[in-house]
């Protein structure tokens, strides 16, 4: 496969898809409370996407994924499957939303706090968001993907956290996961050179403990930290513009 440069018409469709994905995260916010199950959150998001937004929830049946969103709680790194277990006070949960609108994908995720969350867990979530923002800030034509990976790794490790290696950001468009792979570690001045019109995600997964992960054999999807310590993730879909980037999945609560 190769990296596609989006046309003006495609960029407009990517903007629409990105905004719709962001709006799902804005819509679901007030529902994230102790006692709600991730299945209930999945159903609310599914119905909103299908009935209000007229979009396709991209995860549903994607390589056999059984639900419409990913819900990754505490030491789940990514690809958590919504289930009937209630969220409890102090949990942190990532909701990862991907919509398809008019053939194009918008992909975004954020961390939510369930009730009162311990300061160490809040700090992991905050530093992981900073990792995403530091990576985004480097996006412009001529920058290299290694620059982005490096700044993310540096910030995570300076805070005594680790970067998950097995999963990465990705090109996005007509395809859910297009080239290039956007890893969240690396060396400045290496890797793909960015060009105006590229669209890709940055979605760092940062662990409080060691970087190693395992996929549950039981369901083939859920990725957990091996040491069962917390993991956090945030994701945006980005467009490379002439002089920087546009965050296609920017939410109202964000000020960059
Ligand atoms: N949304 C995830 C990503 O950011 C991919 C989820 S694939 C699924 O790339 F099948 F688990 F939904
Ligand atoms: Co993604
Ligand atoms: Co995603």
Image: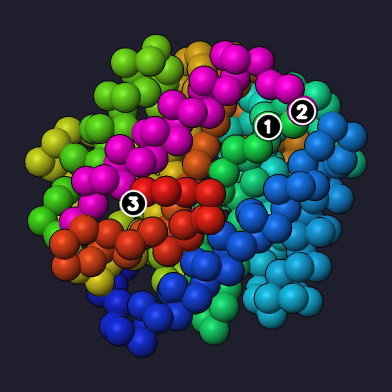
Looking at the image, is 235 positioned above or below residue 175? above
Residue at x 59% of width, y 19% of height? 121
In this rendering, which labeled residue sits more in front, label 3 or label 1?
1
Residue at x 84% of width, y 48% of height? 39
Please provide percent x and percent y for residue 95: 65, 46
Query: Could you tell whether 177 is left or right of 223 in the image?
Result: left
Q: Nearer the viewer, residue 9 or 175?
A: 9
Q: Nearer the viewer, residue 162 or 218?
A: 162
Can you identify the residue that label 2 sits on? 115
Q: What secondary structure predominates along the stretch shown in magenta?
A: helix
Can you identify the residue that label 1 sits on? 113
Can you identify the residue that label 3 sits on? 181
Q: Which mark is residue 129?
A: none
- Residue 90 shown in magenta: no
Query: Could you tell whether 40 is left or right of 28 in the image?
Result: right
Residue at x 34% of width, y 18% of height? 157
Residue range in magenta is: 115-140
Q: Is disc 1 surrounded by few (<14), some (14 to 19) or many (20+) residues within 10 Å? A: many
Q: Is disc 3 surrounded by few (<14), some (14 to 19) or many (20+) residues within 10 Å? A: some
Distance between the alpha carbons at the discs numbered 2 and 3: 35 Å
> Quick one: SS at disc 1?
strand
Quadrant of the rendering where the N terminus is positioned: bottom left
Distance between the alpha carbons at the discs numbered 3 and 1: 29 Å
């Amino acid at each position: 496969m190769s990296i596609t440069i989006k046309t003006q018409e495609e960029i407009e469709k990517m903007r629409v898809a990105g905004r719709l994905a962001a709006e799902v995260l804005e819509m679901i916010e007030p529902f994230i409370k102790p006692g709600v199950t991730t299945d209930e959150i999945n159903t609310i998001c599914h119905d909103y996407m299908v009935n209000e937004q007229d979009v396709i929830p991209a995860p549903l049946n994607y390589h056999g994924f059984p639900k419409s969103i990913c819900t990754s709680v505490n030491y789940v790194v990514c690809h958590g499957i919504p289930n009937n277990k209630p969220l409890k006070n102090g949990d942190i949960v990532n909701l990862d939303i991907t919509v398809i609108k008019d053939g194009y994908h918008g992909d975004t995720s954020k961390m939510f706090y369930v009730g009162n969350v311990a300061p160490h867990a809040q700090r992991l979530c905050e530093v992981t968001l900073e990792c995403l923002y530091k990576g985004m800030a480097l996006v412009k034509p001529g920058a290299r993907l290694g620059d982005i990976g490096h700044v993310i790794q540096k910030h995570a490790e300076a805070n005594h956290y680790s970067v998950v290696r097995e999963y990465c950001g990705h090109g996005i468009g007509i395809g859910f996961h297009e080239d290039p792979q956007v890893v969240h570690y690396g060396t400045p001045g290496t890797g793909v050179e960015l060009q105006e019109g590229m669209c890709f995600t940055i979605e760092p997964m940062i662990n409080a403990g060691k970087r190693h992960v395992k996929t549950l054999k039981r369901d083939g999807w859920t990725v957990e930290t091996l040491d069962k310590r917390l993991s956090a993730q945030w994701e945006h879909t980005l467009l490379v513009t002439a002089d920087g980037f546009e965050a296609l999945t920017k939410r109202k609560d964000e000020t960059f």
